Amino acid sequence: MAGSEMVAQGGLKAVFSRLIAATGPIPIAHYMAESNARYYAARDPLGAGGDFVTAPEISQMFGELIGLWLADMWRRAGQPDGACYVELGPGRGTLAKDALRAAGRAGLSPDVHFVETSPALTELQRAAHPGAIWHHDLSTLPDDRPLLIVANEFLDALPVRQLVRTAQGWRERMVGLDGEALVPVVGTRPMDAAVPASLLDTPDGAIIETSPAAAAVVQEAAARLATQGGAALFIDYGYHQPQLGSTLQAVRLHRKVDPFACPGDADLTALVDFAALVPVAEAQGARWLGTVEQGSWLRALGIGARAKALARAAQHVAPAIHAAAARLTEREEMGALFKVMGLAAPGWPDGAGFARVSEA
């Protein structure tokens, strides 16, 4: 469905309703992919006037520490020529601005490549980074030089597939109609073959959630690291160990709303299963550096010292600086829910802030 077609026919909810009425329920993954494509195409969703706020918008410290981490990896890898900074879903370009400034002070001044599909956000990025090169996916990135990849709150917006255990066996969770409302329903096709053997006897009502799209992104990134060199950071809210249940949610105007109420007008996300992504990356030959909580990673990189330095230089906003650091690191804020997964090429060093074994 083209964006212009959806607008002309009265919005995405109306299009979904007609499609479901004509052909039957659609998979959750289809619903989520179409909804987010429409949502991001025509708006800047970030900031107080948008629908949500990400870490780079909270404080410059977040991007600065990422830039220093990348520069440290590059330096200890022997400062290879031609390294590229690659960001997936760079938002307004704020993270890149802070990261590249800090990396430049450490001696790293890479070419900049952005993977972005939103025309609205591309325009904002172009204003902030006029020398960058844009890509619709990872396939057109340079293939002859090391890549320093950053993906902050990117994987969570990729579509998820849900399977639900019923009395008749496993079925795919779909989106159907109840009157005029879009609602989750159970599909009719048996899906037992898609369920790991260890979960086949899970009690009725259990939901398994996977993201083939997220796995494909990590697979491509890892394969490039293995052949080209480089390192990657995937930062998102998610979990270390496999878990059951739906994590699909929608946010609009900084509040959670019904994921099925306003497709295309709310940000749809799901928690990232980082445990499932580790073997995907390792199968491509990349090194898994670890997966740790964002708070512990930022503290290990020195966010406390950076906050004190900024507060001394700008005492009139010192309370706000310390509050931002707390929001990024405290467990009851973003510190525990958000995780940082590090990958590197064979022969590249271990990354600062990572344990070799994922946190429990």
Image: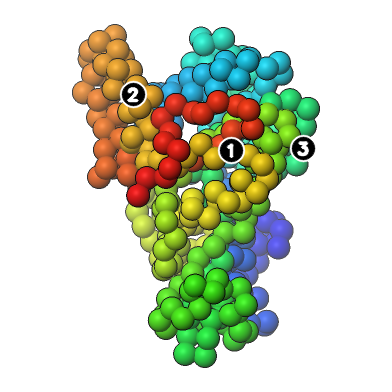
Q: Neighbour class for label 1 at 10 Å: few (<14), some, many (≥20)?
A: many
Please say if 144 is above or below 174.
above
Task: Identify the residue under disc 3.
Answer: 140
Q: Nearer the viewer, residue 24 or 216?
A: 216
Q: Nearer the viewer, residue 336 or 47?
A: 336
Instruction: Name the amino acid type tagged 3.
Output: Thr
Q: Neighbour class for label 3 at 10 Å: few (<14), some, many (≥20)?
A: few
Please say if 242 is above or below 172.
above
Identity of the residue drawn at 43% across and 42% down: 357
> Which tag, 2 or 3, sits closer to the chain's start?
3
The x, y position of residue 102, in whole percent, is 49, 16
Q: Neighbour class for label 2 at 10 Å: few (<14), some, many (≥20)?
A: many
Nearer to us: label 2 or label 1:
1
Nearer to us: label 2 or label 3:
2
Instruction: Name the amino acid type tagged 1.
Output: Arg
Identity of the residue drawn at 61% across and 46% down: 281
Q: Secondary structure at mark 1?
A: strand
> Which tag, 3 or 1, sits closer to the chain's start?
3
Task: Identify the residue under disc 1.
Answer: 287
The x, y position of residue 311, in whole percent, is 26, 15
Residue 297 in view: yes
Identity of the residue drawn at 54% across and 40% down: 288
- Tell me the colour scheme of the image: rainbow
The x, y position of residue 31, in whole percent, is 58, 66
Instruction: Name the amino acid type tagged 2.
Output: Ile
Looking at the rendered structure, which numbered label has been put on residue 254? none
The x, y position of residue 353, in whole percent, is 41, 30
How far is mark 2 from mark 3, CA to CA?
35 Å
Looking at the rendered structure, which numbered label has been put on residue 303? 2
In this rendering, position of residue 336 left or right of residue 21: left
Residue 127 in view: no
Q: Secondary structure at mark 3?
A: helix
